[in-house]
Image (cartoon, rainbow, N blue to C red):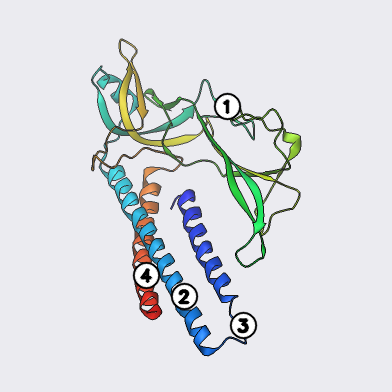
Amino acid sequence: MRRREINAISSIIIYIVIIYLKELLRFTPESTVSTFTYDTSQLARIGGSVLFILGVFLLYYYFRNKALLSEVSTVHPYSARELRLMCSHDFQANVKAEGTVTCDSPVIAPASRTPCCWCKTKIDQKVERTGRYGEPETYWEPFHDEVRSAIFKLTDETGYVLVDPKQAEIDTEKPQFILAEALPETYTNADLQLDSQEMIAFAFEMGIPANYDYRITEEIFLSQGYAYVLGQATCAQEGTNPDVLIHYPSKGYVEPGKKVFVISRKEEEEIVAEEGITLKICFWFSMAAFLVAAYCLVVAR
């Protein structure tokens, strides 16, 4: 299961736990039997609704990962030389290729200042407010998102092809988490500039330090090492020295409506094994969520 999916599912589960805890804290020893029954009914209704949403979410990922697994298993692999020989003005095919990544003109990740082929920088701002029951709440609110990318070369023993990583599902390096007291006055959405002296490395812990107002999360794909690419290939340049570009597909190979574009550090065997496990987890957990949701809604009646 990919890191983003794990984080998303974990966030939903944590959100469900928080809702339950908030509702449970409303119970008091002085509560009458009728009040407790009402609160239990409300809690069951809320829990059932949230579990139903979780089931839908997991089922969505099930079908999404099933489409990815079908593409990985069905699309034909090509070497760089084979793709170059097929290159013509009307050439278009869903392909998979693998090789070593190099980039002649890398982009610079704005927070870490790291040269790379692709990076995603997300800034969240700390917000403090009074909660539903009068308690103080602190949470992170999205402030800025930015994605930068550069076309890179994927080289094997027969030559190279070009890859445009825009819109790809990318297996990035481990995300970097940074806290900042403030953003500099020169900050603009077009050109994110962060003073490294105002930032510190931050390992995730419970709670938010009071003296930090911004959280920066940055994912990068370095211009080095092995990569597996699944996408659509077209001819970027014809002639005696043709160039083939792999990019986001105009349609899926197995199912035209499901477009798959993957750039991964893992080999195909590892991807297939991981996606097989993901399919089983998503399916059975979604079924369990639907069953428990149905039970909760029946109890709430």
Identity of the amino acid at label 1?
Ala
* Residue that mark 2 sits on: 42
Sequence order check, earlier mark of 1 and 2: 2
Q: Amino acid at mark 2?
A: Gln
Is residue 276 among the parts visible in the rendering?
Answer: no
> Where does label 1 land, which residue?
190
Q: Residues under labels 2 and 4: Cα distance? A: 21 Å
Q: Which residue is the site of mark 3?
A: 28
**Image height check: is 181 above or below 135?**
above
Farthest-out residue, top? 240
Q: CA distance from mark 1 to mark 2?
A: 47 Å
x and y percent of residue 267 in the render? 41, 42
Residue 71: x and y in percent read: 29, 43
- Of badges 2 and 4, nearer the viewer stands 2
- Residue on which the image places disc 4: 288
* Tag 1 and tag 4, C-beta contact below 8 Å: no
Closer to the camera: disc 3 or disc 4? Answer: 3
Q: Position of residue 86 (x, y in %)?
A: 25, 21
Outermost bottom residue = 33
* Residues at marks 3 and 4, CA–CA distance in whole angstroms: 31 Å
Circle 1 or circle 4, nearest the eye: 1
Q: Left or right: 178 with respect to 15?
A: right
Q: Nearer the viewer, mark 1 or mark 2?
A: 2
Q: Earlier in the sequence, mark 3 or mark 4?
A: 3
Percent of width and height locating residue 228: 40, 37
